[in-house]
Image (tube, rainbow, N blue to C red):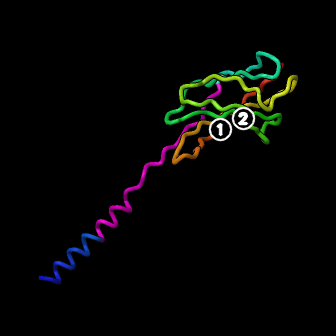
Amino acid sequence: MKDQKAVDQAANALTSAINSLKKVTPVITLKAPVIKKAKSSSKGKISITLKKKVVNAAGYEIRVSTKKNKSYKLSLTLQGASKLKGTAKKNIKSGKTYYVKARAYRMEAGKKKYGPYSAWRRVKVK
């Protein structure tokens, strides 16, 4: 009787350990935002509008570069999932052509987790 009770307790402990390993937190992925409009409305500024909000996003980062495929620098952060418009002024000079792209982020344990980048858009700054 004692042996059977010990075997049952060990089996229950093992089953409990296996079940706790099976409980995996779901991975929340973000989709890439779509840039609806990017244009230069005044000297040294680029106005950016995103098409629609990304599910589970806490905000968006807008990056700019003078080259199509490298050295993008952070120019603007749109905080809040529903904020889809902004004006980038940082890292922008008048008279140059810039490539703009965006990505969504969410907060997880105090750190930003990023989604993929959008397609780039070319803008000639006034």
Q: Which mark is residue 63?
A: 2
Please state the horizontal and vertical placement of residue 116, each as a whole percent of the image. 62, 41
Please state the horizontal and vertical placement of residue 112, each as a whole percent of the image. 59, 44
- In the rendered view of the protein, which quadrant contains the N terminus? bottom left
Residue 121 in the figure: left or right of residue 10: right
117 part of magenta stretch: no
Please state the horizontal and vertical placement of residue 7, each as a whole percent of the image. 21, 78
**Pointer 2 local density, CA inside 10 Å: few below 14, some 14–19, many at least 20:** many
Residue kind at label 2, given as amino acid type: Arg
Residue with the most extreme right position: 95
* Relative to 101, residue 2 above or below: below
24 part of magenta stretch: yes
Residue with the most extreme top position: 41
Q: Identify the residue at image location x=35%, y=61%.
A: 20
Q: Which residue is mark 1?
A: 117
Residue 65 in the figure: left or right of residue 85: right
The image quarter containing residue 60 is: top right
Residue with the most extreme left position: 1
Q: Tally the numbered discs.
A: 2
**Pointer 1 local density, CA inside 10 Å: few below 14, some 14–19, many at least 20:** some
Q: Identify the residue at image location x=58%, y=39%.
A: 105
Helix or strand or loop: what does disc 1 sit on? Answer: strand
Q: Identify the residue at image location x=76%, y=39%.
A: 72
Q: Identify the residue at image location x=84%, y=18%.
A: 126
Question: Contact, CB < 8 Å: mark 1 with mark 2?
Answer: yes
Cα separation, mark 1 vs mark 2, equals 10 Å
Residue kind at label 1, given as amino acid type: Tyr
Q: Which residues are magenta?
A: 14-35
Helix or strand or loop: what does disc 2 sit on? Answer: strand
Q: Counting residues from the N terminus, which is met first, the one under dot 1 or under dot 2?
A: 2
* Relative to 113, residue 123 above or below: above
